[in-house]
Structures are given as C-alpha cells and as structure tokens.
Image (spheres, rainbow, N blue to C red):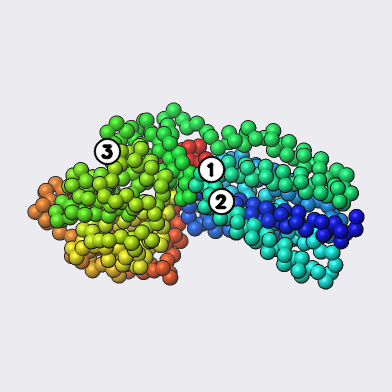
Amino acid sequence: MTDNASLSRGKAWLFLTVFLTGASVMVIELLGTRLIAPFYGASLYVWSSLISVTMIALAIGYFVGGRWADSAKRTGLSLIIALSGLFTLLIPWATRSVLLATDPLGLRGGAFVSALVLFSPSLTMLGMVSPFAIKLATAKLEGIGSSSGSIYAVSTVGSVIGTLLLGFFLFPWVGSRQILVSLGFVLLVLAIAVAIYEQKYFSRTIAVLPCMLLAVLGLCLLPKIVGAGHVDPSGRFSVLSEHESLYGFVRVIDDKKRDLRMLTADASMIGAANIPDGVNRLMYQDIVALIPAIKPTIKKALLIGQGAGHMAMTLRDRYGIVTDTLEIDPAVADAASKHFGFKSNGLAIVGDARYEIRHLKGPYDLVIHDCFTGGSEPSHLLTVETLQQIKSLLSPEGIMALNFVAFGKGQGQQALASVSKTVAQVFSNQTLFISEPGEDFNDFIFLAGNQPIDLASKSLSYEQADWLNKRKYPLDASNGIILTDNLNPLEHLQARKSEHYRHVLVDWLGPELLVR
C-alpha cells in the first residue's frame, strides 16, 4: 500500500484519534483541581499550577513528539497513546502519596510540584500525539500547512467537547477518580485500535503487543487504583457523608472526642455543631446573632453563603425573622438539610451570588455575607460592585454583616485593611468585631450601613453589650487597596492566611483524612 493510499484511508481514523486525545487533555487538566483542592484549597495558586503544568507538559510533548515522528517512520503513535492511558490510570493511585510528600513545600510550592508530578507524564504523552499525527497526515511538503491546521483544529474541537462533556454532564454525576480511571482505559482501548491499524497498513509486526501488555498492567493495578482514594479515618472521626460537586469536595465529619460535627468543603470548615443537640460552635456567628437585638426592627434577612444553615435557624428560632438563603453548592445545601437540621423559612436559593442577587427583590433589613470555601474567599464577592449590589437590596436602615477570615496584624493585615476600605466605599458607617479577642488570626465581622451601630441600644442587655464591646476591633485601613472587579489582588494578599488555615485544618483533622 502506498503512503498516499494509507493517508487517504486513515484520515477519519487520524482525526478521531486527535479528537479523543484533545478531549483527554482538558479532562485531565480540569480534574486536576478536584484532586488537589481538598488538600491545598481551590485557590488561584492551584489553578495557576495546573494551567502552568499543562502548558509545560504540552510544550515538552510537542518537542519530543516531533523528534520521534521524524525518526519513527510512521509507527509508534499507538505506544504513545497507551503510555498516556497508563499514566492517567496511575494519577488516582499516586495522589495521596504525592500530596503528603509535597506538604512541606507550602501552599504554592506544594500545589505546583504536586501538579507537575501527577499530571505531566500523561499530558506530555498526549502532547506528543499532534506532531505525530501531522507527520502521518502529510503526504507532500506542500500539504503540511493544511494538514497541521486540520489536526490542530480537530484536536481543539475535541478539547471543547471534552470540557463541555465533563462540566455539563459527567462531573455532576460521576466522581473525578472514576472519570480518570475510565479515561485511562478509553485511551488504552484507543491505543490498541491504533496499533491494529499500524500493524495492518504500516507492516509493523509488534505494534499490538506492547499496547496489550500495558492494558493488562492497567487491569492488574485497577484494585489498588480504586482503593487508593478510600482510607478509613482513625477511630476519633467518622465520615457521615461525602459528595464531590462542581464546586468542591463536601463532607460531614463527626469528631467523637470533641463531640463535634463538621461540614467541610475542600480545605475549609464551613459549619460546626454539637453532635447531640446541633448547637452552633462557630463563635463569629454569635456576634451576627446579636444584630437583631441591636436593631429589633429587623423582620427580613438574606444569608449569602448558607453553610450548615445555623445563622438562618438562629434568626428564625430566636427572633422569628424570615431569612432567604443563597448557597452556590447544592452538595452543601443537601448536607445542611440532612445532617444539621436546616430548614429554610424563606427562599432557599442554590446559585452563584453575583448572578442571583441581581434577581432578588428586597428590601432586606439584614444581609449576612458569609462566603468562605476551599481556604479562600471568592474574591469577586468582595468588590465595590458586589457590595453596591448588596446595598441596593437593603432597606434604608438595613445592615450588612460581612465575615472575613484574616490576620489582624503583620503580614496579611493588608487584606483586612483592603476589605475595610472597600466597605467604606459603599457604606457610610462600619463597625468591626473579632471572634476571639487576643488572637491575631481571627474571624473579623464587619457591620455596615447608613447609620452607626448603637451598642448602647436599650434592647441589648448589659451582658450582651459588654460582650460585644470587648470584641470591637480598631483597624488602621490606610494601607488597604480598594477592591474592584478590575483590580482585586485579594488572593495574593491572603496567601499567608490560606497557608495558615490549611495547616490548622491539617493539624485538626490529620493529613490522612484531609487528603482524598
């Protein structure tokens, strides 16, 4: 068979190959964050690490693949795909060991090295496919432009379809480990099909055998790969539920020694209560719960960042306030209902806050802004533009309560100052409280509105007023940066906080429970 004939017959086969491998690249890259985020958080550093590692691996793959294609005389593509499939299968198996080994490197170094070790082998092999395919598709020198353009176009379309398939259909229903294992075997099956083609049309007598051996090796390793993500916690802990959603890995964990039930999302605790009676254990919420005592006219509230739902339940049970709740993660909303007894007496909205608050109808007497997950705050919810949207929902005497985890002094204080300065751009008055007096790392609660907060209100008992006054926090916000949709360096300013918070959670739960 001539080269022209083989290229003509293999056009559809070649395009299918680059389509599937292009889709595989994006699936691996996107799933990478879901494997790393439970340990390092869903921060900009994790995303930057994954994107950088993907680009590095593809660049190496393009270079090595081009050299191999020039020397391989039209054979070897099947082995490349088979190796990518095996390396993809090994990702879930290696994740726990790699994350624990990179922990001493810190948030940024650990996230980057973890991504490099886990994902670069398979992504490098997938990067080798395109130059090899271009060599196979090019019959004459003058056709190299159209051949390479077609190959990269089909590969890019595959990446688009892979991204949409993962985000819209697979990820809401299938765990990331299961998707990676399935993808690994899809690549191994594709490699065997390509090997059969190479053996038949390019007279390569042993093309199928290496691919079959790698597929058998993958099958032999399957029990260890599947079991790698399930390590039983120590007797102190019991995991009541776990669910991987589009936004994070959500778990409900009982700490028997401390009589504590926790709701976690990735590397963050977003709810805590006593196991027997469900009483809230997060101190900052006790501050927010006294706002209706300061201003008894509050009748309607909005909670942005529902978490376990304790704030809404306190406002309902203690004051009879109707509270609408807004939570981005349906897995969190489900866990709050099933394991923390949450039941809304207002609207229970599941969706992104920036979108949903544009469609809400106020006025609200109180808006509680409590968005925190994955060890970092969603920066787009702490800008002038977002706070202006929240202010538009408030009644004339309404109050916004904003919870922000940060350091009050030293490195990292600028983040707190920036939030304060941003709040001051929108609200004429603000009062700042801390959850734990005397602690530098703290929950800081901003109460903001058109009027100052009156701690001398007759509706407050002496004990309540004294308790709040002891938690008032003076802040010099002169070094703060006004956060906007255009300029928002909050994640950079919160690097120290994210690293500290992660270690607090690791020390509390232990790395074996935190790492999937």
Q: Which residue is mark 2?
A: 166
Q: Position of residue 374 (x, y in %)?
A: 44, 50
Residue type at mark 3? Answer: Val
Position of 37 relative to 387 (above/below): above
Cα–Cα gap, marks 3 and 1? 32 Å
Of labels 2 and 1, earlier in sequence is 2
Residue 260: tell me if it is visible: yes
Q: Which residue is mark 1?
A: 175
Foreground residue among 447 and 248:
248
Please identify, in this view, whether the residue under mark 3 or under mark 1 is nearer the observer. 1
Q: Residue at x 38, y 34 (%)?
A: 254
Q: Residue at x 48, y 44 (%)?
A: 244
Q: Decide if residue 307 is on the left or right side of residue 486.
A: left
Q: Decide if residue 154 is on the left or right side of residue 212.
A: left
Please identify, in this view, whether the residue under mark 3 or under mark 2 is nearer the observer. 2
Q: Position of residue 275 (x, y in %)?
A: 32, 33
Of labels 3 and 1, earlier in sequence is 1
Secondary structure of residue under mark 3: loop
The disc label shown at residue 279, or none: 3
Residue at the limit of the structure toward the top, as seen here = 235
Give the crowd class for mark 2: few <14, some 14-19, many >=20 residues within 10 Å: many
